[in-house]
Image: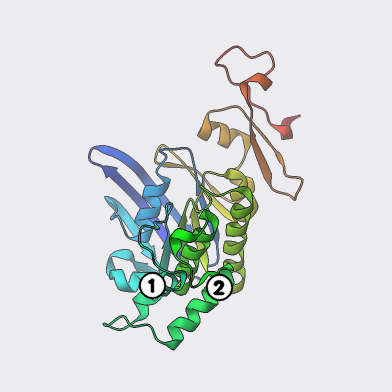
Amino acid sequence: MMIPAVEARHLAYAYGDRPVLKDISFSVEKGDFFVIIGPNGSGKTTLMRIISGFLKPGNGRLAVMGRPIGEYTRRTLARTIAMVPQAVSVEFPFTVMELVLMGRSPHQGILGLAGKADRDLARQAMSFTGVEELSGRRLNQLSGGECQRVFIARAICQDPGIMLLDEPTASLDLAHQVRVMDLMERLRNEKGVTVVMVSHDVNLAAMYGNRLLLLKDGRILSLGAPGEVLTYDTLEAAYECALLVDESPLGKFQRVTPVPERFMAGSRPGSILLLDEGRR
């Protein structure tokens, strides 16, 4: 039996007396493209911070590669999990090469000096993400899309088995969104990395994820393949808005369209008309 990359059992977390996650259980298999979705305030980022080891769950158990996360040191966990945060900082004028090389720190000795092998891996990571020609540029000279790919290159340079991404496309234009998602798909297919991502974009989740976790009010509302999770009834329960669910013209996966009030024929102000292409 294959050991899951991530396994959560009855996780719970609260900020003070405010519960954020309640009885969360799921597993992420090795090689999954696992996308966590849900409305604002559903607990997505908190769950990601627990998986990354930055937060300790109030209750429950979390295992990474079959080992309880509490048994990892920060250094050994960084050899297994790489995290690309939601907001990337460019406060310090590091060059692209300097930042990407930081990904090698969990693998280096006490002096933290980068050797030839480290630099070779950094160049490979930059080549993979298409930023090799930017290696001498400083972060504050890059566009948002370039900067995001540089931080992904740093994460790849860690040589992790699991890549965590918190809203990696949130501030990017459409072209850069697709480039980042295509990079993650390549990373999974070519290098066998398990990808776990938080996203607000259910359409990107439908196109790229092979398994989805839908949260609502800190609980799991649905878990499974995109076709099982992105249904009309489930999405209406999660987002509580008018929507249309049909099949994408690109393939056999769902397309979700929010419906503005002016298209809700015959509805009274403030009412909700729910549309489902599959029921027509």
Q: Is residue 38 above or below residue 47?
A: above
Task: Please name the amino acid that badge 1 sits on.
Answer: Met
Is 1 rendered above or below residue 27? below
> x, y percentage for residue 1?
50, 71
Residue 3 in view: no
Q: In this view, does 121 lie above or below 72?
A: below
Residue at 52% over, 44% down = 200
Element marked by disc 1: helix
Mark 2 and mark 1 residues within 8 Å of each other at the beta carbon: no
User: Quick check: 28 left or right of 245?
Assistant: left
What is the secondary structure assignment of the residue under circle 2? helix
Q: Position of residue 245 (x, y in %)?
A: 67, 36
- Image vertical order of residue 278 relative to residue 229, above or below: above
Q: Residue at 35% across / 43% down in the picture?
A: 22
Q: Residue 7 in the image: state x and y as whole percent.
A: 42, 60
Mark 2 Cα shell of 10 Å, populated few (<14), some (14-19), many (≥20): some
Kindly identify the residue that appears in the image at 28 percent across and 55 percent down. 56
Coordinates of residue 109 in the picture (x, y in percent): 30, 84
- Rounded to the nearest whole Å, what is the CA distance between mark 2 and mark 1? 16 Å
Left or right for 197, reference 93: right
Front-most of residues 29 and 93: 93
The amino acid type found where label 2 is placed reads Glu
Residue reaching furthest to the left: 16
Which is nearer the eye, 48 or 176?
176
Q: Which of 252 and 91 is in front in this view?
A: 91
Say which residue appears at 42% left-offset and 75% top-offset. 101
> Which residue is labeled 2 in the image?
132
Mark 1: few/some/many CA within 10 Å (<14, 14-19, 20+): some
* Residue 102 tag number: 1
Q: Pick the quarter of the image with the C terminus.
A: top right
Q: Relative to 217, is 181 on the left or the right?
A: right
